[in-house]
Image: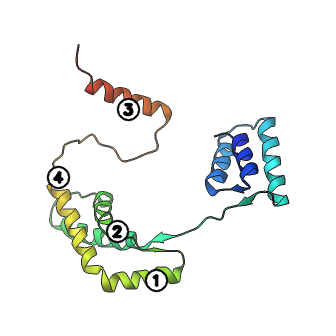
Amino acid sequence: MNIQAIVEHALNEGYLTPAMEAEVGRICDSAAELSVEEYMALDRLMGGLLAGEVVTVPRKQFINVMEELVITETISQITAIEVDSDLQLDVGDIAAYALNRLPPLYATTEEGASYQRDRAQKELQDLITQQVESAISQNLDRPEFFPERQAIAKPSGDEVVKQVSSLLESYAPLL
């Protein structure tokens, strides 16, 4: 989406979302120089914001307390295993596996996070420990099917085309 389209949408709908704001910022940061049309669109957006015709949707900040508890437990268990062996375990894989089997504990304030943390340590610590143990067991028992796998990254357009081309070549029958 370009700046003009974002501004037009914001003016028509009457609001500017954090995603729209971030996209405008990304475009402005990556452009060597903005066009006259882009400057005019930004000027219209600023006028709409100042006049109250466009409002910004506030960013809601929140955390999932379960993530920090699972990562702490994962690191603790992995450290104990790695000290006694030459295994290298992936914290991200193990934590993600365990988190997918545990309830989320979201909070929007420090007080809420503290409450969720205390509650989880009293009521869910055994379950967290069990799920991390299960995740580690699963990770250790997993065969190395795809040793060439890569962590998720935001690929560029060229990389996507290369990946799709490579995938098609590997699945296409040889002629």
Q: Quick one: 32 or 120, which is closer to the camera?
A: 120
Question: Contact, CB < 8 Å: mark 3 with mark 1?
Answer: no
Q: Which residue is mark 2?
A: 71
Question: Contact, CB < 8 Å: mark 2 with mark 4?
Answer: no
Kindly report the distance in space between the C-alpha atoms of the residues bearing marks 4 and 3.
Answer: 25 Å
Q: Which residue is mark 3?
A: 163
Q: Which circle's residue, 4 or 3, is located before the other in the chain?
A: 4
- The residue located at (30%, 68%) in the rendering is 75
Instruction: Determine whether the residue tagged by mark 4 lies in a helix, strand or loop.
Output: loop
Callout 2 amino acid? Ile
Please say whether residue 12 is visible from this viewpoint. yes
Q: Quick one: 6 or 38, which is closer to the camera?
A: 6
Callout 3 amino acid? Gln
Question: Contact, CB < 8 Å: mark 1 with mark 2?
Answer: no
Q: Which circle's residue, 3 or 2, is located before the other in the chain?
A: 2
Kindly report the distance in space between the C-alpha atoms of the residues bearing marks 1 and 4.
Answer: 36 Å
Callout 4 amino acid? Arg
